[in-house]
Amino acid sequence: MEHASFIIGSWVLTAVSVVVYAVFIVKRGRSLSQNASREEFPWT
Amino acid sequence: MQLDKTSPSGTGTPATRTLGVLVIASLIALSLFGLVFSAEDVVQGSTVRIMYVHVPSIWVAYMAFAFTAISSAVYLTAKNRSLGWDRFAGASAEIGVLFVAISLVTGSLWGRLTWGTYWVWDARLTSTAFLFITYIGYLAVRRLGGTHRQRARRSGVLALLAVLEIPLVHFSVRVWRSLHQEASVADKGTDVELDGLMLFSLFFGLVAFTLLFVWLVIHRQRTLWLEDAYADKGLDAAIVARREEAGV
């Protein structure tokens, strides 16, 4: 594939950005949920 | 320790887990279609493969900012003024900023290969950069002090103003002379013909990224609910402590 570094780079950058953000959200949610009882969560 | 799969852990629920699996599967499929199965473009060659992440990224950003404006409008106009709408607005804006950034960087890499430069002060690129900075400002305003309702009111007004930039960005290629091409797939007036698998990959990318947006916004707004609840509990505890100090 021509220009593979640019193409793969674009995809990897997108994937890494999304994964890092998703992990941040999930971890923050898990951390904060320790401070509240599950009955309080509106999504339960 | 055995986790109970039916009870929520953090911000997840069985429904979001199912959605998450669907998102991962669709993104893997998109990678195969975008990088392996689809053909190279006659003009762009293999660089067209960047489009399968670049176009869905700006699509999600537009959708996220529109959703921010709609949620803010509902918050500002509804009688009950539920803060849930404000949290949806904040979550959506944050995701929009992430995807505008991805769109700018992937577009810049594509531009280096196609135009020979990473950046030009072209109408589309400049207005997109301005959109990015505007929503960074929106997120900064959300972090100013005050109550949750003060935050919701001021950021809601800002969201309704900021969303006006989206048509400016989108139509900038028509209003001003631009290096960036006009919409070439959705516009029926052009003579662009895409190979079936290329078109499928592009639209599959839009669907996959939309599902990803839904998963992210659900989790992020729940995290924001937890942040608000945590702040409220901290405030309640501080008020009780001060009252005890004052002997009230």
Image: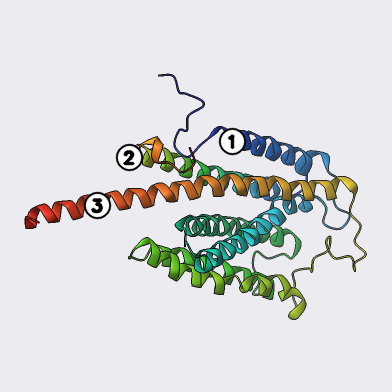
Q: Distance between the residues labelled 2 and 3?
A: 14 Å
Q: Which chain is mark 1 on?
A: B
Kindly identify the amino acid type of the residue bearing the numbered disc 3.
Asp
* Residue B123 horizontal/vertical position (percent): 68, 75
- Mark 3 vs 1: CB contact within 8 A: no
Element assignment for label 1: helix
Residue shown at the point (42%, 67%) measured from the top left: B141
Discs 2, 3: same chain: no
| Residue B23 visible to the viewer | yes
> Given this view, does label 2 or label 3 mark the residue nearer the observer?
3
Query: Which residue is found at the position 7% from the left and 58% from the top?
Result: B246
Instruction: Identify the element where label 3 is drawn.
Output: helix
**Numbered mark located on residue B15 in the image:** 1
- Residue at the limit of the structure toward the top, as seen here: B1
From the viewer's side, name the closer residue of B98 and B225: B225
Where is residue B57 shown, x and y percent of the image?
Answer: 66, 55
* Category of crowding for the residue at label 1, using alpha-carbon neighbours closer than 10 angstroms: few (below 14), some (14–19), many (at least 20): few
Residue B126 placement (x, y as % from top left) = 62, 73
- Say which residue label 2 marks: A35
Is the N terminus of chain B in the top left, top right, bottom left or bottom right quadrant?
A: top left
